[in-house]
Image (cartoon, grey):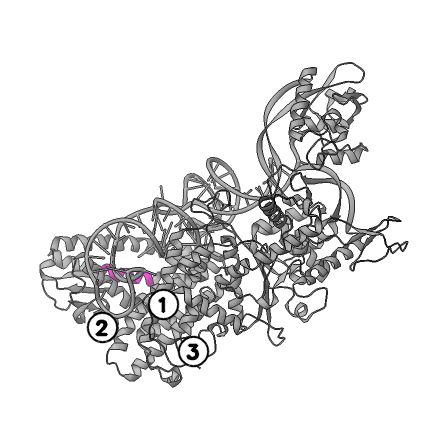
Amino acid sequence: MANETQTQGLPKVFEPKEVEAKWYSSWKEKRYFHAEVDKSKKPFSIVIPPPNVTGQLHMGHAMDNTMQDILVRWKRMQGYNAVWIPGTDHAGIATQIKVEEALREEEGLSRHDLGREKFLERVWDWKQRFGHRIREQLEALGVSCDWERERFTMDEGCSKAVREVFVELYNKGLIYQGSYIINWCPRCQTALSDVEVEHEDQQGKIWHIKYPLRDGEGFITIATTRPETMLGDTAVAVNPADERYHDLVTKTVVLPLVDREIPIIEDDYVDPAFGTGMVKITPAHDPNDFEMGLRHGLESIVVIGEDGKITEAGGKYAGMDRYEARKAVLADLEELGLLVKVKEHQHAVGQCQRCGTTVEPLVSKQWFVKMKPLAEPAIAAVKNGSTKFVPERFSKNYLHWMENIRDWCISRQLWWGHRIPVWYCQDCGEVIAAKEDPTACTKCGSTDLEQDPDVLDTWFSSALWPFSTMGWPEQTAELEHFYPTSVLVTGFDIIYFWVARMIFMGLEFMGEVPFPDVLIHGLIRDPQGRKMSKSLGNGVDPMEVVAEYGADALRFTLITGTAPGNDTRYQPEKVEASRNFANKIWNASRFALMNLEGFDPAGVDTGALQLSLPDQWILSRYARVIGEVTRHLERYDLGEAARELYDFIWSELCDWYIELVKPRLYGNAGEEAKASSQYVLWNVLRGTLELLHPFMPFLTEEIWQRVPHSGETIMLAPWPQSEAGWHNPQAESDMETVMELIRSIRNIRAEKQVPPGKAVSAIIHAPAGRKQLVADNAQYLETLAKLGEMTVADIGSAKPEKVVTAIAAGMEIYLPLADLVDIEKEIGRLKAELENTAQEIKRSSGKLANAGFVNKAPEAVVTKEREKLAALKEQEERIRARLAELQE
RNA sequence: GGUCGCAUAGCUCAGUUGGUUAGAGCGCUACGCUCACAUCGUAGAGGUCUCUGGUUCGAAUCCAGAUGCGACCACCA
């Protein structure tokens, strides 16, 4: 118990830097982030989307992890057995490219100069060197990851899981090897999966080329955007329904430049309306042509090699780069008079996600995961709601992709990654897929085995993350307790890469979806709405923002004003606003601490509190906020929850309650009254800090530790709950009346430019039912509206001649500002107000006169409208009466 | 070509079971260093919630269409 308040040495401005370092190391040291399996509690678990091990934290990470941290901290406070498992991804191509670049720049060497083993050593070195950076950056954000459970996709356990999955799928026939058309990056020198190819519309050309008929009876004309691939043509296709070409189908053409005789075939795929209606078929270099080749038993001739150059099969063009070859082919065709025409043409070109090089489709022997059997349950899981996307609309994207999925090419011709656990017997050719490295051939016993040189797609190991991090394939207590995880938080950009694959792998190997909820967020863009990117140089480093404004401010910025799934712009002004908010809380707390000196909540008899109207009001508002914040969090509306707290703290707690409580704290209301208000102030502040803690962990801990509290840390404080009796609609409405009077008087003062420091007196004429309310709360009007002397009287009572009038809450307020009174202006102002009120009355009474509304609208809505109308009429009456007086 | 999203104050954005006199931050205007806070306070200006129809007693909110942006998917050579 720390029951004494500590105010000494609190600066006027919140200084996040030291506070953050102090608390983070303290939390870690005390192992508050760590969770052991505790079956007495309900589990709550999250696995981090593992960032690239050598990467750096960007704004997207900062937001993604802040969201996760909010959820975990909240659930932890709610008493769940909450765990957040962190870790990093080896990021196959991305990391290999980086290391290769460094090697070239620093030593002028390629990876081949070093050789596989030495190169891999370098990558591990690299990982050692930069692998801590991302973790330190995450820590600076304040995330409450269970660092004792930190994992890496290439650590021993994850590697074991990868092998297990590979071999199991292989044995089930769901992983196979074969020569199919795949996406090849000539620069990275590896195969890619479909999702690793980004399609971009480019302005290109389409060429019409004549192919001579074999029988010498003229030519046919085909259209192509890639003339160089003609070297690998093995047919020309027309649509069977295309009568123009019906007679040609039995014929053959002689492929120019190559002199190969190829058939003219019919296939429905061909669109008669496009180009000339005749398509050259290159099975080895076009996915469609490949399919057609299979249908028609066409030969597949690879003419572009893995280096992007023409192969030996390309005859005299062999060795030329594919673009060079295009020029040469076109020139030769031109010379032969076979080039009919060229047109501008826009078409989508596939590019390597990592390096931007134009991808070359080519036939190659690779490993694939057979997707149909895995996709089916994964589709069902989302359709039947076992896994829900938030916002829901993303499930449509997911389903569309899953339903049209093609087999997943998982082998990569890289060195950095999980080596494919397949060995080839050099003696008998047996293919052995094994979880443990084999020493001898399972068929012939030969020890001359060679492992497949390729590695797996980096997303293969990521797909296992929700269970590999919990120790699978061992049957651990963690798996039993924490799987499935509670929610996955990630960006929409990796739904296909990652989310989808986790779902089918989870279903296949755990028999259960890996998470019931997927919370999707958008991208962080720059102030102009552009994507933050290295090439544009418009990225903002979250660490710089943390250094300048504090982690709490950054976190709050990234969470507020955003709706799930929507992109947001990063605006420095917003961080400033968040920083100011932190400072506001800091100062409100300083106020509270100064006035809680010597206060001990344990000494308060909560059954005998003497609550003032503001006390009752703030408790009621506080009760509401607890409910709202909790409700929003439950719906993953983090931004709304944060906004709710912002408004409550600034507009209600600071702007009103703190001002309202001053008379009791400073004045001589009596010790018991003072203690009651102290109790309320303490309780609301402490509880509000607790509600805010998931969003702004450092600031809230720093203050919480200084106010009376029980427990070691706010991190483990129970999530606030509203108490019976706090909810108080009467107090809210009474307080609202008082506030309305205050606003109204302030308004007049401002309008009349009464100096803020000058007290004025006021006469308030109130209806019988509300006289007492005003009289009882006179002190608040006096303090907050800076009134000297205040008189409450019945409506129609006598008053001084020269007064400025305001009508509010159905009462007449008179400020005797003698020389400032201008009757004409008074009349003008009152008339305008009357006009407004009359408008409202018209609207409201119109609504109530509508039988449809009265009969069909819910009772409460109608009642509310009636009350509103009554108040408006009262208001109107007051204004009219006053106007009549003035116009006499 | 298909699917989806967005269009609300000068700017950036909230607004989820349809029921307010439509909100916030920044910016703007006036006044104020009042002992929690000038990273502040008080008061104020500023919006036919893109347009057109429809459903409903009632629409920023639901439906249809239009326009303008944006995203994703796609094998039209």
Q: Nearer the viewer, mark 2 or mark 1?
A: 1
What separation in Å lies between label 2 and label 1 (alpha carbons)?
30 Å
Circle 2 is placed at which residue position?
Answer: A778
Would residue A468 be found to the left or right of residue A215 on screen?
A: left
User: Which x, y percent locates residue A754?
Assistant: 16, 60
Circle 1 is placed at which residue position?
Answer: A586
User: Which x, y percent locates residue A667?
Assistant: 24, 78
In terms of secondary structure, what is the magenta stretch mainly?
A: helix
Amino acid under disc 3: His
Q: Chain of mark 3?
A: A
The single residue placed furthest to the front in the displayed view is: A107
Q: Chain of mark 2?
A: A
Q: Earlier in the sequence, mark 1 or mark 3?
A: 1
- Tell me, for residue A709, which label it has, or none: 3
Q: Chain of mark 1?
A: A
Rendered image quadrant of residue A17: bottom left
Identify the residue shown where x is 70% and y is 64%: A472
Within 10 angstroms of label 1, few (less than 14), some, or many (20 or more) residues?
A: many
Q: Are marks 3 and 2 on the same chain?
A: yes
